[in-house]
Image (tube, helix red, strand yellow):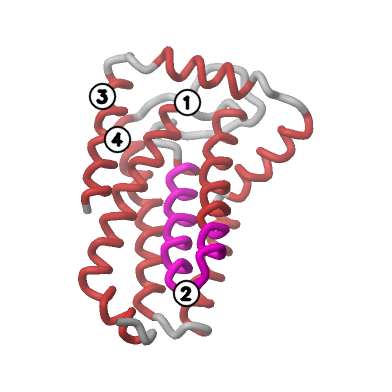
Amino acid sequence: MAISLLCAIGFAGVALLIGANRIAVFDSSVIASIQGMENDRLTYILSFFTWIGTGLPVAIITASAALFLYAALKHRMELLLLVAVVGGTGLLNYLLKLVFKRARPEIYRIAEANGYSFPSGHSMVAFSLYGILAYLLWRHIPRRAGRIVLIAISSLFILTIGISRIYLGVHYPSDVLGGYLASGCWMFGLIWLYDGKYGKSAVTHRGGP
């Protein structure tokens, strides 16, 4: 819950800076650094990662994870947590964009995108999807090395999808940062609720203390 509240405060801070037009220097410098690395191979790679963050791949990954949780591990409540985090993130992003109505950057674009800019939907969904998968799978990986690999892979996908949106010119860096913080607030809040009600029984069910 503490992390969830910190994310909420961080998101509010980013939103206030955007509203006061005091984050433009940060946005411009990060955009210049990331887009300054443009080359054909990197464009292909980051276009692939941004595609992973779109509706169909997200739906397939979420459905596959839900099927695994239900069929292989018999954990129905973890399945509901996964669906609530990912599905709720999409709804939250839609509502936040309607509230802030920030226009997309008028800069060099490699790709095109419609709709409002803040917070980044790709970044929010990436954080929620790969964050909650890391949380759920962590519980079933006994070795420390396996857990480190899990966190590294999840972090790679989250960061790369966010960076891809800046690189392609369809989001400001503050959109991505705000997306991470909004998603973090939602995800960690639901995890707190889940652990408070089901965490201990889940550990006991798996033979834990």
What residue does disc 3 label? 16
The residue type indicated by label 3 comes to Leu
* Quarter of the picture holding the N terminus: bottom left
User: Range of the magenta residues?
Assistant: 123-150
Q: How many C-alpha atoms fall within 10 Å of the one at disc 4: few (<14), some, or many (≥20)?
A: many
The circle on residue 11 is: 4
Q: Residue at 26% of width from left, 68% of height from top?
A: 195
Location of residue 101 in the rendering, given as x and y in whole percent from the top left corner: 35, 29
Location of residue 163 in the rendering, given as x and y in whole percent from the top left corner: 56, 34
- Determine whether label 3 and label 1 are within 8 Å by CB: no
Residue 141 lies in the magenta stretch: yes
Give the number of the mark in front: 1 or 2: 2
The residue type indicated by label 2 comes to His
Location of residue 116 in the rendering, given as x and y in whole percent from the top left corner: 43, 32
Label 1 and label 2: CA atoms lie apart by: 37 Å
Q: Quadrant of residue 8?
A: top left
Label 2 and label 3: CA atoms lie apart by: 40 Å
Label 3 and label 1: CA atoms lie apart by: 15 Å
Q: Is residue 94 above or below residue 40?
A: below
Q: Please identify the residue farthest to the right as the structure is shown.
A: 40
Q: Residue at 58% of width from left, 57% of height from top?
A: 56
What residue does disc 2 label? 140
Left or right: 29 with respect to 39? left
